[in-house]
Image: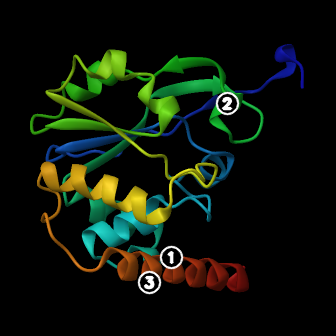
Amino acid sequence: MSPSSSIRLQGLPPAVTAQTRLLLLGSFPSRASLQAQQYYAHPRNQFWPLLATLFELDLMRLDDAARLQAVLARGLGIWDVYATCEREGSLDTAITQARPNDLPGLVARLPRLQAIAHNGGESARMMRVTASLVPVCHRLPSTSPANAAWSLTRKLEAWRLVFARHGLIASAGSDPQTGLSQALHSGHASIQARNAQG
């Protein structure tokens, strides 16, 4: 596909409430997420299994609306750093002509916001902007299946430290490996069930 024939993609609206304490920023929704109009809809993305383990909730058996409400109620907000872009496929390395979201405008509407966490390296490129918006910014390992350099357990522990620091979870919880395995298994089972129904 030549640059002149690239389709400009539009991202998703922010998922936040007035109670949001930690704003989690991805780069831009995957092709699967855009098609479903849901955050982190790709079945191999580890985002929802990680949150299910951190919050000790069976998120993988909920539909998207209920799952999103469950994490919003615990002080987490979700958005992306880019509003629009051109991209072939779903890899961050393929993003071109990106236009940033109005992050300062969103942060101004979140009175309880303590910190921003960037999900992966492409999102973290915007830390030059977000670092001036909140007291603390974090760079977290990407939950994308393309990030094979980090094991699931290492990702979970990095995310746990940030979530605990800002009061979204207790500092100690259930065994991380057991909880993560259960969440991943539940997620795969839910996806298989939806495919069978379809």
Q: Is residue 93 left or right of residue 121?
A: right
Q: Quadrant of the C terminus?
A: bottom right
The residues bearing labels 3 and 1 have C-alpha atoms spaced at a distance of 6 Å
Image location (x, y in percent) of residue 110: 17, 34
Read off the residue under disc 3: 182
Read off the residue under disc 1: 184
Q: Residue at x 46, y 58 (%)?
A: 47
Q: Nearer the viewer, residue 165 or 148?
A: 148
Image location (x, y in percent) of residue 132: 22, 16
Please tell me whether mark 2 sits on a helix, a strand or a loop: helix
Please tell me whether mark 1 sits on a helix, a strand or a loop: helix
The residues bearing labels 1 and 2 have C-alpha atoms spaced at a distance of 26 Å
Q: Residue at x 35, y 22 (%)?
A: 127
Image location (x, y in percent) of residue 75: 19, 53
> What crowding class fits label 2: few (fewer than 14 Cα within 10 Å), some (14-19), or many (20 or more)?
few
Q: Nearer the viewer, residue 91 or 159?
A: 159
Three-letter amino acid code of the residue under disc 1: Leu
The residues bearing labels 2 and 3 have C-alpha atoms spaced at a distance of 31 Å
- Quadrant hosting residue 113: top left
Q: Is residue 25 left or right of residue 186?
A: left
Contact? badges 3 and 1 (CB < 8 Å)? yes
Image location (x, y in percent) of residue 114: 13, 37
Observer able to see residue 14? no
Read off the residue under disc 2: 93
